[in-house]
Amino acid sequence: MNPVAFTVFGVSIQWYGVIIALGALLGIYLAKFNCKYRDIDYENVLDGVLIGLPCGIVGARLYYVLFKFSYYSQNPAEILNIRGGGLAIHGGIIFGALAAYIYTRRKKINFFKAMDIAVPSIILAQAIGRWGNFFNQEAHGGVVSEAFISKFPEFIKNGMFIDGAYYHPTFLYESIWNLIVFFILFYLLRKVKTTGTTVCSYIGLYSLGRFFIEGLRTDSLMILGLRTAQIVSLLGIAVSIVGFAYISKIKDKGIE
């Protein structure tokens, strides 16, 4: 697959960047309609996005570079080259959430109400953004048979045929899972009024799917011989469980 979408004045624009930008724009547009479900001013949400999004991109790159430090320490000029990939979503979520927390504290906005609004947009952007990995021929799993890959559309078959072999399209598995999670969160935001329910569901459901899908990948970031994303996913599931326990506790006390 050609990773270049088009050129502008001789500068190539990668599909990776185009798709991530598309996901971000659709997420922002969706947030505009979701604000009413947690009584949040959209202007505040937009300001938060303008702060949180670049922080998230920086965090996603720093996280990736940190766990690939042996390579980037020898190739420092490549640290800023994100056009060909190399953004770790967990780093983006962590840095983006920290930026959002600081912003909401300064603006005296309930952080968890704001995140309830944000997470459906985030998971939708993730579902779309995974297709950037497709064009870069990355974030795939191990080798599979032609019979297995034949069950997928032709353009996915072509994209997963790399160096004479077919590979698990794990980018597709995660994109589908993220889309399922998006519809669950979309429903919860509208039907469940308790603050924090949507964000805890996002953390738990995304982490659950990522844990299993990550086990199929061959390009995982590693720490001490373990897949970093699986470790973080287990922590995410634990955080989600603790969050729901806390929500249940304050709900029993009549606090919304």
Image (cartoon, helix red, strand yellow):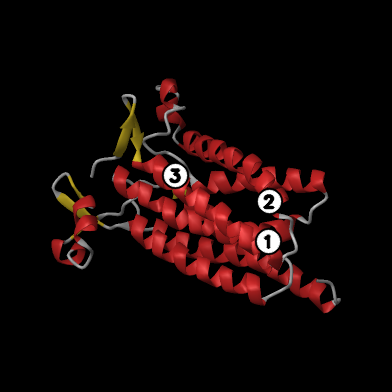
Query: Mark 3: few, some, or many residues within 10 Å (few <14, many ≥20)?
Result: some
11 or 224: nearer the viewer: 11
- In three-dimensional space, the C-alpha distance between marks 2 and 1, rounded to whole angstroms, equals 8 Å
Query: Decide: marks 2, 1 in contact (CB < 8 A)?
Result: yes
Q: Which mark is residue 64?
A: none
Image-based side of 25 in relation to 154, left or right: right
* First of labels 3, 1 by sequence position: 1
The answer to whether any part of residue 61 appears in the image is yes
Q: Residue at x 58, y 63 (%)?
A: 202
Q: Which mark is residue 35?
A: 1
| Secondary element at tag 3 | strand
Residue at image mark 3? 222
Image-based side of 159 in relation to 247, left or right: left
The answer to whether any part of residue 225 appears in the image is no
Image coordinates for residue 90, horizontal then vertical, percent: 53, 48
Query: Mark 2: few, some, or many residues within 10 Å (few <14, many ≥20)?
Result: many
Amino acid on which the number 3 mark rests in the picture = Met
Disc nearest the viewer among 3 and 1: 1
- In three-dimensional space, the C-alpha distance between marks 2 and 3, rounded to whole angstroms, equals 35 Å
Image coordinates for residue 132, horizontal then vertical, percent: 37, 47
Residue at image mark 2? 45
Amino acid on which the number 2 mark rests in the picture = Val
Q: Quadrant of the N terminus?
A: top left
